[in-house]
Image (cartoon, helix red, strand yellow):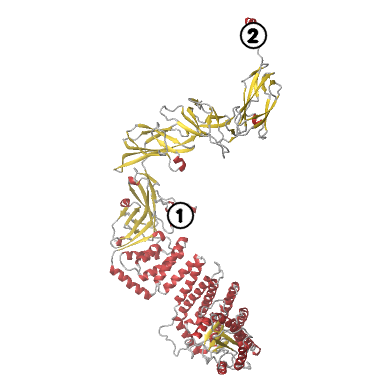
């Protein structure tokens, strides 16, 4: 039996398509025929009908049809399904034979051509004798045919040709060789497909007709065979629903067969074939759950049908193939759009296939371990006359024998032996690895990392058994990381043991050393005697000796390895193997710890290196060195002991570098930091511990950073969560878990011994030169030099503050934008012990709000550290937050000459601008002067002089000014008319005389200016007296370019009598003025309402008396009448 017998036949796995043969085409020498053939075969899209085409000669011999049975009464079937039956109907027996013939309707030699065509058809029929295959004729014509019914000659000749060829009209086709060839070919294909459908339908009917002749007693196999054939023909007919139904029936019939050791293989083979078909169709119908359910049912029914115990490995092979085939089907369905999930994907089926392949391998080892003297039987019982079996699943030495009794036990024995010997030559590892690789790819795709790692371990072990140690190591090394990170120590130990064997058998020095180091460590679950053996081997390798073989290795592989190790020993060169331990768990643990997170530059830097060995015996190292990010410190952190290689395992307790298992060793290092490293971080980049002699072979254990390996983080987490009480240790020892790694420290400046004090009067006022007095006093024991002052706005604040803050040392000058926000490195000089100095700093803040100011003083001083003199730069800084506020609030308002508030002013009519300065400063302010700068659109009525010169304002006090202005007519200005600027010059009252005066500019608000047609103003005394005449003049001025018709009336008042025109109508020319004189006679004392003047403009009805009353007084104060003073009264007084 061939090792590939378990592979499914190609004809079972392919998609069945109707088989159509084309005759009469010379595709080699005839270009037209070649174009026709290419149109049939090339670039077939999915939307074209499923047909398999083949070009054959017209006289091709098709398989002979066996004579039809009239009765099955005495017929005993020899098997279920012949091995060639599927291939015969897929590739040998056509559903339709198409005869191509070049013939136009107007052919001159029509009779001869018709006769020749009929002859060709007859030859085809003769070669298909007894079969139901359809025959069709295609006439290749040069001209495009006319529509049906229009060409009478064509119709007549077509009928004649059909009669001559004994064809129906539906079997004659015309193929014009024109530009639209592909379109005609597609139409032809569809017609061929219909003929093929008819053929397969006939075949199904023919097979079904046999059922009535069968009986359940002797024809059980035929029931299965016929049901399978019906299903297969239905597939060829593309009736997949009926195909699935018939395959299911066939599957049930297979399991109804009586099973015996002699026919169990045939039953399983056919069950596997039919199951494959059912699952394939279920996936095709997009019912994956049905496919999975069918497969599970199939496995449950067949997994215990083992058959002959001597050939049980065959059952394992068959089971493996079932799972593999289903995995392939599942994967193919996914590629076509099916969605799989993490818990149901092809990977599980490939994994199970690999499991049965491994079982097959184990059974082969058990059942096929014949001695070398046993030879393969001759003649070969597995050979057949034709080279293939007649029926699927039968034994070659007893084909067609259905008896449950073995007629020739000796032949059976020889056949079994031949199968066993052939099985021994199968490369099982290759099969297993392929299946595992498929499973790994699926689990990787569906994000199942643990399943992937588990199978990769199996792949690695399989490579090991296959003696491909390089690939085994590569795979095992890849998965070790996952098991280390998750803490699967038992699994990791098992993998490491296999990896160590691979490294030994390949004599890979570095890998052997690395795996030995880890197997000796705390992560290894090996027993102490096994660790002792590994430790001894490791030392042997370092001493340039061959290690002892690893247990359970293949004997031949060990001999090869010993030769390789002998070659390694003979070369005997120096070898330094650096092993980075951050990715594995060695037998030595390391932690580093600086004594403090930071050190002053004048204090020695101290650090401890903690080391702990986990190996079974005391071990001696030769060197310990620490590396830093500044390599100049490396020389201060080295411990080295000269030793011989033979002393590595000697317990010399008095030696520094001898480690006792389980005991923590501490090494203290000390060095002075360099002054240029002030402000920098010193980091431990690595710790190297050397095992062996550097002149010979040695291993450098390299810890990156401050120590720790692949298991450290997990152990630290467990220790932090543990509530277990730690046992008390002697004072000289520490608990390993209590040591926290501190791998870096900061070098900071020496502690300054000076005082910095700030004196000022907050808050600062906006734009003033705010004085900040800095006092620096030295408390050092020696002189300090190169004292520098940095002062100003602390960096890192809002950028707007930086632009609006200016600092200077010269208070007599006003700061501008050229001054910085921070003065840096202002030299101050030297200071003796106890000496102090003062610096005055002036700050100008252009906006209100809080600001943080920094005063930073640095200096140089000589000091001694560990008998080494160094120059230290010390510094001290002070910060202060200063609030900046407005010095005063300025309120501006426009009022009429009667001091009434104005929303708008009137052109050419005087109004008052009033300013009110309210002090918001907690300190007294001196208003040096004020100035009103008018816009061009404004004119003063009188002189603009400051009325607040030298005024001192305390907190909350205010000073007011009043200016009389008028605005000429400017037309309608959108947004109002600019008034100008109000400039206040001021400074703190407490400021020194040379402090510059600050000018604060207030932009005055715009005012809306309106034109009025008539302006009225009144001349009258400031007061009146009872019963004394009070002359009043009203001036009416026409402000327009039109003649104004004015109606004037005076309404009397109870407090006055008056003389003058009570009602009058007059005209006022443009730009002129009319005067009205009245004599008012007060009757009552007090604040009295004047007789009301009413003006009505006929041209401007909107001009109201309410507007008029803005310009003229409506009341006046009347004093009582005075008494006459005579001399007598004076004398009496």
Note whether 52 is above or below 1007 in the view shown.
Answer: below
Camera-nearest residue between 817 and 708: 817
Q: Position of residue 893 (x, y in %)?
A: 57, 31
**Residue 258 visible in the current orientation:** no
Residue 716: assigned label:
1
Note whether 605 is above or below 191 in the view shown.
Answer: above
- Callout 1: helix, strand or loop? helix
- Callout 2: helix, strand or loop? loop
Q: Quadrant of the C terminus?
A: top right
Badge 2 crowding class, 10 Å Cα cut-off, few under 14, some 14 to 19, many 20 or more, is few
| Rendering quarter of residue 914 | top right
**Residue 707 visible in the current orientation:** yes
Q: Position of residue 555 (x, y in %)?
A: 38, 75
What is the total number of numbered labels drawn onto the structure image?
A: 2
Quickly name the residue at label 2: 1125
Residue 288: assigned label:
none
Residue drawn at x 33%, y 48% is: 670
Q: Position of residue 956 (x, y in %)?
A: 54, 28
Q: Dots 1 and 2: beta carbons under 8 Å? A: no
| Tag in front: 1 or 2 | 2
In the rendered structure, the answer to whether residue 872 lies left or right of residue 998 reads: left
Badge 1 crowding class, 10 Å Cα cut-off, few under 14, some 14 to 19, many 20 or more, is some
Camera-nearest residue between 458 and 126: 126
Q: Position of residue 918 (x, y in %)?
A: 53, 29
Camera-nearest residue between 1025 and 597: 1025
Report how far apart the C-alphas of labels 1 and 2 lie in the structure.
116 Å
**Label whose residue precedes the other's in the sequence (1 or 2):** 1
């Amino acid at each position: 039996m061939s090792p590939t017998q378990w592979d499914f036949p190609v004809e079972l796995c392919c998609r069945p398509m109707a088989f159509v043969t084309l005759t009469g085409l010379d595709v080699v020498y005839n270009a037209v025929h070649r174009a026709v053939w290419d149109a049939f075969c090339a670039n077939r899209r999915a939307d074209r009908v499923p047909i398999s085409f083949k070009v054959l000669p017209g006289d091709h011999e098709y398989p002979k049809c066996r004579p039809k049975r009239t009765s099955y009464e005495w017929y005993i079937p020899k098997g279920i399904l012949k091995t060639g039956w599927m291939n015969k109907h897929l590739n040998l027996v056509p559903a339709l034979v198409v005869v191509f013939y070049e013939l136009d309707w107007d052919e001159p030699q029509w009779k001869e051509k018709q006769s020749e065509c009929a002859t060709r058809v007859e030859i085809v029929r003769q070669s298909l004798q007894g079969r139901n295959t359809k025959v069709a004729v295609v006439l290749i014509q040069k001209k495009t045919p006319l529509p049906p019914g229009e060409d009478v000659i064509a119709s007549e000749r077509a009928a004649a040709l059909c009669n001559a060829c004994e064809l129906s009209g539906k079997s004659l086709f015309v193929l014009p060789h024109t530009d639209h060839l592909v379109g005609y070919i597609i139409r032809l294909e569809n017609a061929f497909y219909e003929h093929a459908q008819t053929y397969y339908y006939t075949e199904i009917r023919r097979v079904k007709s046999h059922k009535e002749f069968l009986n359940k007693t002797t024809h059980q196999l035929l029931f299965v065979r016929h049901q399978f054939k019906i299903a297969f023909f239905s597939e060829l007919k593309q009736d997949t629903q009926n195909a699935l139904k018939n395959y299911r029936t066939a599957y049930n019939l297979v399991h109804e067969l009586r099973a015996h050791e002699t026919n169990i293989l045939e039953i399983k083979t056919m069950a596997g074939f039919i199951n494959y078909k059912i699952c394939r169709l279920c996936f095709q119908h997009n019912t994956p759950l049905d496919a999975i359910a069918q497969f599970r049912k199939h496995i449950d029914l067949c997994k215990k049908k083992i058959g002959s115990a001597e050939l049980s490995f065959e059952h394992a092979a068959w089971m493996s193939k079932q799972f593999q085939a289903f995995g392939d089907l599942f994967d193919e369905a996914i590629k076509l759009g099916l969605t799989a999930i993490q818990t149901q994907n092809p990977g599980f089926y490939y994994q199970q296939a690999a499991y049965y392949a491994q079982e097959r391998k184990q059974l082969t080892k058990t059942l096929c371990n014949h001695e070398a003297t046993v030879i393969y039987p001759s003649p070969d019982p597995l050979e057949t006359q034709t080279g293939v079996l007649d029926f699927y699943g039968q034994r070659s030495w007893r084909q067609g024998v259905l008896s449950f009794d073995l007629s020739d036990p000796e032949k059976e024995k020889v056949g079994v032996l031949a199968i066993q010997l052939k099985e021994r030559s199968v490369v099982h590892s290759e099969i297993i690895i392929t299946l595992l690789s498929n499973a790994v790819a699926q689990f990787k795709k569906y994000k199942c990392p643990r399943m992937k790692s588990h199978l990769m371990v199996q792949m690695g072990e399989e490579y090991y058994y296959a003696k491909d140690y390089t690939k085994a190591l590569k795979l095992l090394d890849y998965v070790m990381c996952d098991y280390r990170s998750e803490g699967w120590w038992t699994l990791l130990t098992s993998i490491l043991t296999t990896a160590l064997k691979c490294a030994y058998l390949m004599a890979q020095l570095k890998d052997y050393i690395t795996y030995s180091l880890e197997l000796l460590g705390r992560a290894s679950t090996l027993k102490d005697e096994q660790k002792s053996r590994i430790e001894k081997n490791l030392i042997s390798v370092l001493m340039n000796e061959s290690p002892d073989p690893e247990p359970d290795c293949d004997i031949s592989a060990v001999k090869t390895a010993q030769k390789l190790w002998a070659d390694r020993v003979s070369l005997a060169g120096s070898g330094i193997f650096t092993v980075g331990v951050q990715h594995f768990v060695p037998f030595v643990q390391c932690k580093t710890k600086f004594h403090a997170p930071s050190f002053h530059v004048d204090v020695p830097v101290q650090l401890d290196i903690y080391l702990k060995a986990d190996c079974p015996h005391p071990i001696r190292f030769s060197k310990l060195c620490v590396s830093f990010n500044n390599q100049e410190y490396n020389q201060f952190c080295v411990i080295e002991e000269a030793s011989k290689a033979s002393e590595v395992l000697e317990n010399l307790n008095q030696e520094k570098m001898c480690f006792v298992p389980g005991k923590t060793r501490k090494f203290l290092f000390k060095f002075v930091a360099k002054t240029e490293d002030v402000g920098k971080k010193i980091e431990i980049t690595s710790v190297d511990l050397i095992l062996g002699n550097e002149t010979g072979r040695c291993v450098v254990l390299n810890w990156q950073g401050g120590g720790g390996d692949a298991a450290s983080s997990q152990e630290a987490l467990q220790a932090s969560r543990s509530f277990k009480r730690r046992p008390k240790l002697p004072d000289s020892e520490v608990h390993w878990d209590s040591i926290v790694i501190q791998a870096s420290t900061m070098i900071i400046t020496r502690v300054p011994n000076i005082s910095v004090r700030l004196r000022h009067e907050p808050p600062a006022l906006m734009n003033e030169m705010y004085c900040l007095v800095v006092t620096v006093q030295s408390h050092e024991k020696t002189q300090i030099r190169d004292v520098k002052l940095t002062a100003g706005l602390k960096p890192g604040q809002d950028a707007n503050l930086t632009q609006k803050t200016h600092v200077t040392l010269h208070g007599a000058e006003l700061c501008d934008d050229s001054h910085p926000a921070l003065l840096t490195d202002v030299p101050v000089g030297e200071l003796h012990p106890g000496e102090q100095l003062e610096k005055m700093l002036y700050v100008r803040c252009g906006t209100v709000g809080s600001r943080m100011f920094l005063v930073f003083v640095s200096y140089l001083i000589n000091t001694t550290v560990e008998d080494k003199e160094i120059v230290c730069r010390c510094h001290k800084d002070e910060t202060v937050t200063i609030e900046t506020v407005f010095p005063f609030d300025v309120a501006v308002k426009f009022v009429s000459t009667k001091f009434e508030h104005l929303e708008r002013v009137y052109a050419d009519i005087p109004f008052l601008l009033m300013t009110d300065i309210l002090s918001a400063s907690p300190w007294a302010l001196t208003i040096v002067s004020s100035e009103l700068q008018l816009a061009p659109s404004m004119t003063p009525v009188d002189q603009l002089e400051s009325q607040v010169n030298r005024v001192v304002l305390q907190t909350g006090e205010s000073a007011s000014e009043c200016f009389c202005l008028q605005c000429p007519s400017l037309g309608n200005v959108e947004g109002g008319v600019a008034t100008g600027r109000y400039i206040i010059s001021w400074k703190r009252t407490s400021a020194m005389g040379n402090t510059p005066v600050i000018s604060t500019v207030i932009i005055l608000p715009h005012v809306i200016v309106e034109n009025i047609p008539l302006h009225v103003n009144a001349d009258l005394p400031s007061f009146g007296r009872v019963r004394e005449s009070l002359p009043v003049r009203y001036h009416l001025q026409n402000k327009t370019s039109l003649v104004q018709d004015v109606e004037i009336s005076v309404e009397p008042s109870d407090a006055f009598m008056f003389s003058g025109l009570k009602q009058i109508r007059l005209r006022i020319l443009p730009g002129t003025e009319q005067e009205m004189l009245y004599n008012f006679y007060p009757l009552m004392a007090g604040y009295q309402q004047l007789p009301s003047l009413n003006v009505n403009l006929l041209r401007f009805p909107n001009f109201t008396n309410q507007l008029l009353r803005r310009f003229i007084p409506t009341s006046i104060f009347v004093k009582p009448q005075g008494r006459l003073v005579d001399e007598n009264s004076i004398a009496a007084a």
